[in-house]
Image: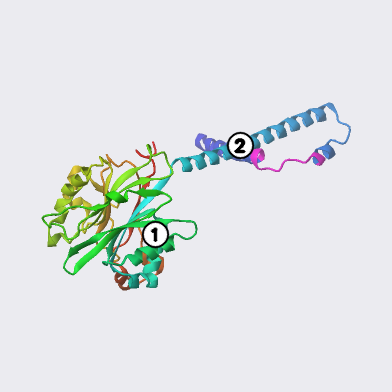
Amino acid sequence: MLSLLSSKKRLLAVAALVAGGWWTFWAPLPQQTELESAFSQPASGDQEEQATLLDQANAFRIWARKTLDQYIVASSRGQEKEKIWRPAIRIGSMNIASLSLEKYQNANVSSLMNEFGRACDLIALQGLQPNQQEVLLEWAERLSRNGLRYDYVLGPIIGRGSEQQQFAFLYNTRKLEVDREHLYTIQDPKDALTFDPLVAWFRVKGIDPSRAFTFSLVNVSLSEPLLGNEQQLLQELIRGVQRDGRNEDDVILIGSIQCGVDTLPIRKEGWVGVLAKEPTDPRRTKSLDNLILHPAATDEFTGKAETFDFLRAFNLSVEDALKISQHLPLWGEFSAVEGGFQ
């Protein structure tokens, strides 16, 4: 019996709170004409007291609603300031094998590159055929419409025999600047790597240079692990970039690794992939690509990273998707402020 009465009391209390909240914040306020009509007749002492209480109640309701409105406006302004105070950039990777101007002009390929390009501020591109700079010119021109502005830096021809390509970085010039004079490929005198990685140094624009996020981005495309031991050389590669004279602590590897990051020796040194074990091929069976960083050094990473599933975006079959690329593009998000949002 006590339990039943307690339940009823709780229900009545909740109903009273709901009714009180509705009456205070949402019930229509009486118009002045309604009040005048209600008390147009000569009032007794009780009626005068009721009128006073009603006036006080309505005054409270008006005050409560104004206070709530001010809180909502202040909160929304605070969120807007927070968004402005915490800008971010997206760094992406795209691997389209045998990319030429003819292939770029294919409707599906151009749609993929243009849509993904607009979603990123910086893209590391692998797979460009030698001497196909027209692709980058047209791509940058397409993305530079509607008030945007993109440019690119292009590395030398790399590879062996018929396996040759060029790496490039496409970037939003309104958000980033690049040191063109110190763009370089990593020296590989022992010819241990099929494709020498391309390294570029970037800094975020629009922020005090002393606080702007700076980083060295290493564009890589490794061979299948069964064909060699290129994955074993990543730690040596990273040390080379860290000692290139810039003293840059934020070194980021991006591109085709051809295996899961957990299998890499650098994982023991604390390096992680932002996509973890997520598959990055159109069949969704292999982890081929990633963006690799060291959390202790690059705490600018916001924790947001995704692949761009262009099969679903463009309603393609797996077979048609594989004709475009063996890899899904990916991106990771970083604070534009050095040291993260703190």
Q: Residue at x 42, y 41 (%)?
A: 207
Q: Residue 84: image x %, image y %?
A: 48, 42
Picture layout, residue 48 above or below residue 338: above
The disc label shown at residue 165, or none: none
Q: Residue at x 28, y 67 (%)?
A: 131
Q: Give the camera-side residue of 233 and 75.
A: 233
Whether residue 280 is visible: no
Crowd around label 2: few <14 · some 14–19 · many ≥20 (10 Å): few
- Callout 2, which amino acid? Gln
**Which mark lies nearer to you, 1 or 2?**
1
Q: Residue 68: image x %, image y %?
A: 61, 37
- Callout 1, which amino acid? Gly
Q: Residue 336: image x %, image y %?
A: 39, 44
- Residue indicated by mark 2: 70
Taking the view exactly as shown, the residue that stands out farthest to the right is: 42
Q: Secondary structure at mark 2?
A: helix
Q: How many marks?
A: 2
Lower sequence index among marks 1 and 2: 2
Asked if residue 30 is among those painted magenta in the image, a careful observer would answer yes
- Residue indicated by mark 1: 117
Extent of the magenta region: 23-33
Q: On the picture, is 253 further left or further right than 229? A: right
Q: CA distance from mark 1 to mark 2?
A: 40 Å
